[in-house]
Image (cartoon, rainbow, N blue to C red):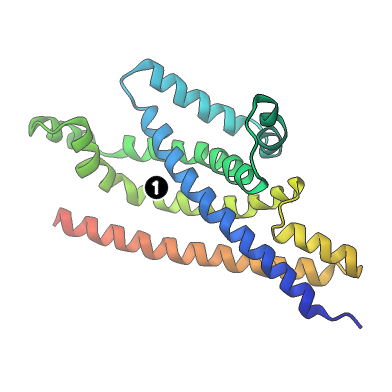
Amino acid sequence: MIDWSGYIGLILQGALVTLELTLMGSVLALVMAFIAGLGRLSRFFAIRALATTYIEFFRGTSIFVQLFWVYFVLPFAGVTLTPMQAGVLALGLNVGAYGAEVVRGAVKSVPREQFEACIAVNLSRFQRMRHVILPQALPLMLPTFCNNAIELLKGTAVVSLISLTDMTFQAQVVRAQTGSTLVPFGTILILYFAMSWTISFLMRRLERRVTRNLDGVRA
């Protein structure tokens, strides 16, 4: 008779690693999304080219390959990262590239009259973006940002390839030690779903709040 309490505890420890990866990776992805998304709208060709190169590279190559490069190849260039650092960097840069197009599209969707009004009242580019454009574009970004965060959560499973003890890695350990597949992988299936549902719930609340605040400003 297998005592599952210890094995479930092992998987829950992996869930904390997965949660940590998701949170830190999402922060990096959000930062990169705004930097690259706004960079593609820059009036300077060099900035647009750099942002476009980043976006196309990370969207056009496999997250598996990116993770292996970050963890196994960068040390040859003198940059050695822990498995956690490598996982956060690879996931954040990959998802950030998709988020960048969300930012660019949302900003472009703001009516042209808003830009013209900002120019008419002599707002600087930073003031236009900070006080007028981004507050209107943000509600358009949030639904896709939610999807990106969930994709990042699911993508954390790849870090088991570099021996980071996330949920998937721990489930594989439990399967190897017990010979059971149903219990460990059924457990992480439920945990992934619970985390995804929580992200969706929180993002829906944030979206309603941002939309309500924007409606109040417009009124």
The residue indicated by pointer 1 is 141
Q: Residue at x 32, y 38 (%)?
A: 107
- Tell me which residue sits at (20%, 44%) in the image: 131
Q: Quadrant of the N terminus?
A: bottom right
Q: Answer above or below: position of 182 versus 85.
A: below
Give coordinates of residue 71: x percent, y percent: 69, 37
Work out whether residue 93 can be spotted: yes
What is the tally of numbered marks visible in this picture?
1
Percent across and percent down for residue 59 are 58, 33
Percent across and percent down for residue 82 are 65, 44
Q: Residues within 10 Å of mark 1 (few under 14, many from 20)?
A: many
Residue 171 versus residue 92 in the image, above or below: below
Q: Residue at x 77, y 65 (%)?
A: 185
Q: Is residue 88 above or below residue 200?
A: above
Between 161 and 75, the residue placed more toward the observer is 75
Q: Residue at 18% x, 59% y: name it.
A: 216
Residue 192 in view: no
Q: Amino acid at mark 1?
A: Met
Which quarter of the picture shows residue 2?
Answer: bottom right
Q: Secondary structure at mark 1?
A: helix
Residue at the extreme front of the image, as rendered: 78
Quadrant for the C terminus in the image:
bottom left
Q: Is residue 93 left or right of residue 218?
A: right
Q: Is residue 156 above or below residue 206?
A: above
Residue farthest bottom in this picture: 1
* Quarter holding residue 13: bottom right
